[in-house]
Image: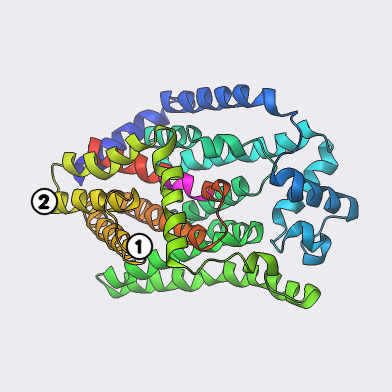
């Protein structure tokens, strides 16, 4: 534990000496390269859900007046989603124009903000080099690259979820409440992030060794319901104005079949953890890292590697199991890995353990949420900052 804390503190002290230290110069270089790569495509017409609902919905709000009320946009365009994204995009449209370049610059601005937030979250749990590594992992993912210039709400959702976790780790009640409320008012799938935070608080409350820490966790647990009440008011008003809480067509797309859920869970795994060369990062984190963690008991290292290999084999259908049992085995493997990893990280750094644990649970929560719903790759974006920060944090731990 002292080795990691002292190493990170030495790096932080060297970083404080310059506004543009090497890590920040790396972040600047990544950001400039990102903007240069995206600029040629800003004038492309709206595509996919941009053209079908979001572009039309934003223009409708700009024409009819800015509002967060459900009736501000026709339900066939809002699809029952909260309207903070539409509100902000329509305000941008009124200020800068409604052309394709102007509206895609809105998305690009949010994407840069998400990269900065990921950098900040990574820096909280290690040095700024950890933040830079997390940002590079995020920027290299094609799901982020594809959506970073599109008029879609997932990047904004990811930004607010990341800021909420930063607020939690920094014990900033104001930042947490504002960011988590904004996430829930951007899209209802933010509930996965909030449930992950609640689950983490419950686990920590049971693990607390003294009454003072238990009370502290209980206070934050109560505080986490404030954003839920804030966002819940939107759906109550929607019920009054439109006659339903959630868009009926979307409710009809929910999946309860074990085989369908397992199929989508595998698609999520391939898209987020295997494709675009990310298979090597997955293997490095899931297999190589436990083996290289020399201070971890051998039995724990063996159990973590075995659990990860088992989960991958089942998800890849190399080991074929009956419907339902496959999901149960994967869930048990992930839970075992979570508790063993958390135990080891906590002996190194509490903040590192907290950040990686929340990231782990958040990924699992978004994974489960998407598995039960209509599946499309763009829904996976919200978990990418947590994958990036979790991976960078574990690599930082192993490196020390």
Picture coordinates of residue 46, whole percent (x, y): 75, 38
Q: From where the camera sits, is residue 171 visible? A: no
Q: Residue at x 32, y 61 (%)?
A: 326
User: Badge 2: few (under 14), some or many (20 or more) residues near its Cα, within 10 Å?
Assistant: few
Q: Does the magenta run of residues contain 112? A: no
Label 1, label 2: how many angstroms apart (C-alpha)?
28 Å
Q: Residue at x 36, y 67 (%)?
A: 324
- Left or right, 52 with respect to 21, comes to right
The magenta span reads: 382-387
Picture coordinates of residue 337, whole percent (x, y): 26, 55
Q: Residue at x 24, y 52 (%)?
A: 310
- Left or right, 369 with respect to 36, comes to left
User: Badge 1: few (under 14), some or many (20 or more) residues near its Cα, within 10 Å?
Assistant: many
> Is residue 285 positioned above or below 85 on the image?
above
Instruction: Label 2, secondary structure: give it.
Output: loop
Residue assigned mark 2: 297
> Is residue 242 positioned above or below 107 on the image?
below
């Amino acid at each position: 534990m002292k080795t990691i804390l002292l190493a990170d503190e030495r790096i932080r002290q060297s970083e404080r000496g310059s506004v543009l230290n090497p890590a920040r110069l790396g972040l600047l270089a990544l950001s400039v390269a990102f903007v240069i790569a995206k600029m040629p495509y800003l004038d492309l017409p709206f595509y996919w859900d941009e053209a079908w609902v979001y572009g039309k919905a934003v223009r409708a709000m700009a024409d009819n007046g800015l509002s967060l009320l459900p009736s501000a946009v026709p339900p066939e365009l809002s699809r029952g989603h909260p309207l903070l994204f539409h509100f902000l995009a329509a305000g941008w449209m009124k200020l800068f124009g409604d052309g394709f370049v102007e509206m895609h610059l809105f998305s690009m601005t949010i994407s840069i903000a998400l990269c900065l937030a990921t950098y900040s979250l990574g820096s909280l749990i290690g040095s700024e080099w950890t933040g830079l590594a997390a940002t590079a992992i995020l920027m290299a993912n094609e799901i982020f690259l594809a959506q970073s210039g599109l008029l879609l709400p997932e990047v904004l959702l990811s930004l607010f979820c990341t800021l909420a976790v930063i607020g939690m780790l920094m014990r900033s009640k104001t930042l947490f409440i504002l960011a988590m409320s904004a996430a829930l008012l951007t899209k209802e799938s933010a509930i996965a992030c909030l449930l992950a935070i609640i689950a983490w608080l419950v686990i920590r409350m049971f693990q607390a060794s003294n009454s003072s820490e238990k009370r502290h966790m209980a206070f934050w647990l109560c505080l986490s319901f404030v954003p839920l009440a804030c966002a819940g008011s939107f759906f109550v008003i929607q019920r009054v104005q439109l006659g339903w809480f959630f868009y009926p067509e979307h409710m009809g797309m929910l999946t309860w079949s074990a085989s369908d859920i397992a199929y989508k869970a595998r698609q999520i795994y391939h898209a987020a953890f295997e494709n675009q060369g990310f298979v090597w990062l997955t293997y490095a984190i899931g297999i190589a890292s436990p083996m290289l963690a020399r201070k971890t008991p051998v039995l724990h290292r063996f159990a973590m590697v075995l659990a990860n290999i088992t989960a991958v084999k089942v998800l890849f259908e190399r080991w074929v199991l009956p419907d339902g049992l496959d999901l149960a085995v994967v869930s048990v493997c992930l839970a075992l890995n979570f508790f063993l990893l958390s135990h080891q990280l906590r002996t190194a750094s509490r903040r590192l353990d907290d950040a990686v644990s929340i990231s782990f649970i958040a990924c699992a929560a978004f994974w489960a949420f998407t598995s039960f719903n209509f599946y499309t790759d763009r829904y996976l974006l919200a978990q990418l900052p947590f994958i990036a920060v979790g991976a960078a944090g574990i690599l930082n731990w192993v490196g020390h």
